[in-house]
Image: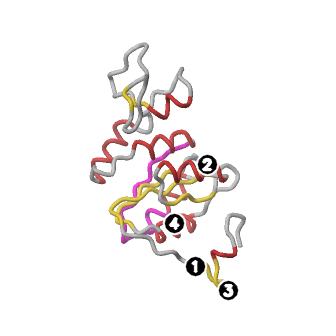
Amino acid sequence: LQHNETGEDFVGKTKVKRERPHKEFAVVTVAMGKGLIDTFTECGADIVIDGGQGHNPSTEDFINAFDEVNADNIFVLPNNGNIIMAANQAATLVEDKEIVVVPTKTVPQGITAVVNFLPDLSVEENKELEETLGTTLVNGYGNNEVVGAAVVSPLFANKPGSIGIPMHGNIVK
């Protein structure tokens, strides 16, 4: 057993693989600690690999996550500069799925990417959006953390004194 597994995850010494419904898109991300793992899951991540600073997941951890998620296209959010290389290496070893590594270097960048993921767009359109905007979709500078997670500032349309446009499901008063 690993530190994040329970006896219910195993039959004998074999880890039980849970069957997931097929999806066109999935998000695999990395976070350390139950609170962040729960946050990413609640924000829409399909699989959260337990890891982070000083506990970097391996290429094998990523490949296992890619195998576990039942999707044709997988967006990967490493959330740490030291983890990007392993994610990229794993992406090159998987041939039956489209793997896109979004080079997030921090947990806030990862949360921003998960919250702003647009499953109605194609892989190419999501890649173009990421390349155009990077992970700086949220204008949280000078605001508190709640505002930064609830609004988006359109590229080249920042207005002084504005907190941005409310994201889907949010109301700003």
Up the image or down, 116 lies above or below 38; here it is above
- Please indicate whether residue 29 sits to the left or right of residue 137 in the image: right
Measured from the top left, where is residue 137 in percent x and y? 41, 34
Q: Which label lies toward us, 1 or 4?
A: 1
Label 4 sits on residue: 65
Label 1 sits on residue: 16
Decide which of tag 1 and tag 2 comes sooner along the chain.
1
Q: Distance between the residues labelled 3 and 1?
A: 10 Å
- Identify which residue is drawn at 67% across, 49% down: 53
Decide which of tag 1 and tag 4 comes sooner along the chain.
1
Segment tinted magenta in the rendering: 90-105
Q: Which label lies toward us, 2 or 4?
A: 2
Report the amino acid beneath label 3.
Answer: Gly
Q: In terms of depth relative to the viewer, which is nearer, 84 or 165?
A: 165
- Please indicate whether residue 53 sits to the left or right of residue 42 in the image: right
Q: How far apart are marks 2 and 4 (CA)?
A: 17 Å
